[in-house]
Image (cartoon, rainbow, N blue to C red):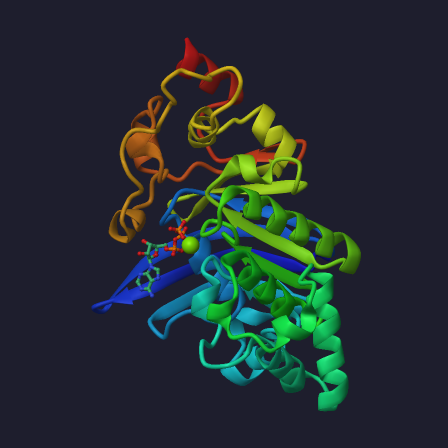
Amino acid sequence: MSLLSLRDFTLSFNEGGRLLNAVKNIFLDIEESEMVALIGESGCGKSATALSLMGLSNDDAEYTGHIFFEGKDLAVFDEREWRSIRGERISMIFQEPMTALNPLLRVGPQIMEMLLVHQRIDKKNAKKMVLQMLKSVNLADEERIYKSYPHQLSGGQRQRIMIAMALINNPSLLIADEPTTALDVTIQAEIIDLIKRMNEQKGTAVLLISHNLSLVKGLTKRAYIMYSGSIVESGRTEDILSFPIHPYTRGLIASIPNVKNRGKRLYSIAGTVPSLEERSNCGCPFAPRCTIRSDRCFSNFPKQKDIQGHSYSCFFSPDEIEERMNG
Ligand SMILES: Nc1ncnc2c1ncn2[C@@H]1O[C@H](COP(=O)(O)OP(=O)(O)OP(=O)(O)O)[C@@H](O)[C@H]1O
Ligand SMILES: [Mg+2]
């Protein structure tokens, strides 16, 4: 059994009495201690998915399907049940740490609070554990950091605080929602290294969310490619990067700078991500932007096909896609 299993999961928002799908019929699995990537353009539904896994969707959100986690279906949890696993079994780090930290409180006590809420532990021991945690996320000078306010720290340090806070209760799943987009490139690499190290040392499974496929190269074993609320391709990250099948994934990869296309104008997929309203029709969500679409692509969502663990949803076969795109 997987640690986390989204089964035919759909998330809709109630907009003036109409239910609009933000995420549609997705299947996604994370094994224990596994690091998995969820990739897609801005607005495709990555954060909406992540927030559902934390029980943090807005009141206007509705789910169908299942969120199996450690043998329970979280899709039917009430707020009291969510509180018992949020920050304890499943934790999340956000794109912009400032929004998740309380600016009026010193960071040490904020991390300690996470411990006190979930564990029977006295303050003295809790503080010891926090200082140790600060050290293990490479915040040397942990006594000073403990007493600092969020604004006294750099962006990279604040993101380390978020990681410390997320991991202090030793959760089995960490969701990292674009954890490095707000940071500069060298700090980005350090934070990614840290998440990787925590995954290895503590065996925490990680769902790493990003719009950047090249970021997850060599980092996650498997990846899911999301387009407009649907998973269009999934499999081993290496396979997806080397042999992308779905026209959308191919476009994504062609838009990553590499040695071959250096100096040339980078490919970009024409058009924009559809709105929630457009997302509620029944065809392939990528059809309006796809260069090889046919009529049926607008009327039905293509069934997922699987080639040795590499899955994709397109009516055409890999050979046909290759031929039509490059022929
Ligand atoms: N509470 C809400 N009510 C209505 N629509 C929402 C709500 N939250 C998100 N959406 C919509 O759902 C879609 C998916 O948003 P989401 O934040 O999940 O995108 P994302 O993939 O995380 O994008 P980004 O890469 O920019 O973070 C967007 O069209 C967004 O406007
Ligand atoms: Mg997001």
Q: Is residue 193 above or below residue 4?
A: above
Q: Quadrant of the C terminus?
A: top left
Give the camera-side residue of 319 and 120.
120
Residue 271, horizontal then vertical, whole percent: 27, 33
Image-quadrant location for residue 160: bottom right
Q: Quadrant of ligand 1?
A: bottom left
Residue 199, horizontal then vertical, whole percent: 72, 54
Q: Is residue 16 above or below residue 112?
A: above
Left or right for 143, reference 244: right
Give the camera-side residue of 21 and 104.
104
Q: Is residue 190 above or below residue 305?
A: below
Residue 20, horizontal then vertical, whole percent: 30, 58
Residue 105, horizontal then vertical, whole percent: 50, 81
Residue 96 visible at all: yes
Q: Is residue 128 above or below residue 92?
A: below
As drawn, the residue found furthest toward the top would be: 327
Residue 168 visible at all: no
